[in-house]
Image (spheres, grey):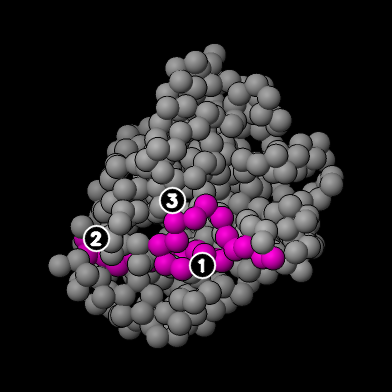
Amino acid sequence: MGTKAAVSRKIALGAAAAVAAASSVVAGSASAAPAQAGTSEGAPKHIFYIMMENHGSSQIIGNKADAPYINQLTSRYNVATNFHGVTHPSLPNYLSMFSGSSQGIWDDCKAGANVTCAPEEFVPGSGDSTDSASLTPAQVASASKTPHMFSGKNLVDQLEAKHLSWKAYMQSMPEAGYEGEYAPTVNGTTVNLYAQKHNPFMYFSDVNSPGNPRLQRVVPFEKNFDADLAAGTVPAFNWISPDQCHDMHGVSPSSASLIGLPACGYPASGPDHGAIKLGDQFLKDTVSKIMKSRTWQTSNSSIVIAWDENDYSGYSGGPGSPVGEGGKVLGGGDAPLLVINSQAGPHKISDKPADHYTVLATIERLWHLGCVENTCSPRTSGSLENLFAN
């Protein structure tokens, strides 16, 4: 989370418990067709990946008062019951899903070749339960001097190498390729709805560089997603980051009041019912639109809904979580993961240990993309392919 208000919220809740041409062809095709070239038989033609925020499975699954729609989905569609964030806080988990690596950082700082930050979690004074586990001195030193603009291979590189189209839809982002850390500004005050830390595309130099056409595929959700669905031009891979009022993260009470959405404000104590309800409604609106679209109804497609981490209940980890001082796992806690398939078969549950590396590795296998970083390791390259099967 990375702000004083966010830390306060965590304490309170813890206490309470030819690429372009080929791509356009793929993106514009919404009719039923066999598997794309270079993909597994029966693999989804379109994947919609939605990243939610900061909650554990027990806070969402079974919480029908705050998340009735999500619980309808979990009773019908496929669920991973042993899914974890790779580590804390948010940004390393987004980087893990996008590049197969947390990039060795433990902070939520902005992107930039000259930006370095000391770890915010697993250090003394973090203000939450992670300070009962520690990074090693070497991890602290390395993280503190790591520039926040990365040059490694990532999912975009893999997709384009296979001539598969992609787009990133960011709610409350002012314009395509927006460079700012937060937005919008209301009456002279920056309201942290759009948060760059939830947009991993901007942390990679082969996307975020002057004049790079890839930046034009990192777009505002509101201005683009409905239009692309209606036109049948959604790409093969669709990344969706709701803003912080709709991904269950929340903002400060003063910011929530400023935008007329008090339910989005961090509570003084206890569970953040308002943020969960707003996120549940966003998912209901967005998933329903996808399911009503021509793309969904005429092609094999999948929706993945994942939470980045459990920000309030310890640091249990997945297969790829780092290990710190004394051999302690520095995980991101348990979190929900759902997979919805347009050609739905029987309700499935997977109890395999999984994390963001597992999700990326699964997509890589379904689409024969190869591997990057931790998805190349037998220890961390498990698969959830059964949740995508009919």
Specify the amino acid type for callout 1. Answer: Pro
CA gap between label 1 and label 2 equals: 26 Å
**Residue span colored magenta:** 162-187
Name the spot of residue 71 as percent of width and height, x first.
68, 62
Which corner quadrant of the image does residue 128 belong to? top right
In the picture, the quarter occupied by the C terminus is bottom left
Classify mark 3: residues with Cα within 10 Å, few (<14), some (14-19) or many (20+). Answer: many
- Check disc 2 and report the residue beneath it: 160
Name the spot of residue 260 as percent of width and height, x first.
76, 69
- Check disc 1 and report the residue beneath it: 174
> Could you tell whether 106 is left or right of 193 in the image?
left
Task: Specify which label sits upstream in the sequence, 3 or 2.
Answer: 2
In the picture, the quarter occupied by the N terminus is top right
Q: Nearer the viewer, mark 3 or mark 1?
A: 1
Q: Nearer the viewer, mark 3 or mark 2?
A: 3
Task: Specify which label sits upstream in the sequence, 1 or 2.
Answer: 2
**Is residue 178 inside the magenta stretch?**
yes
CA gap between label 3 and label 2 equals: 17 Å
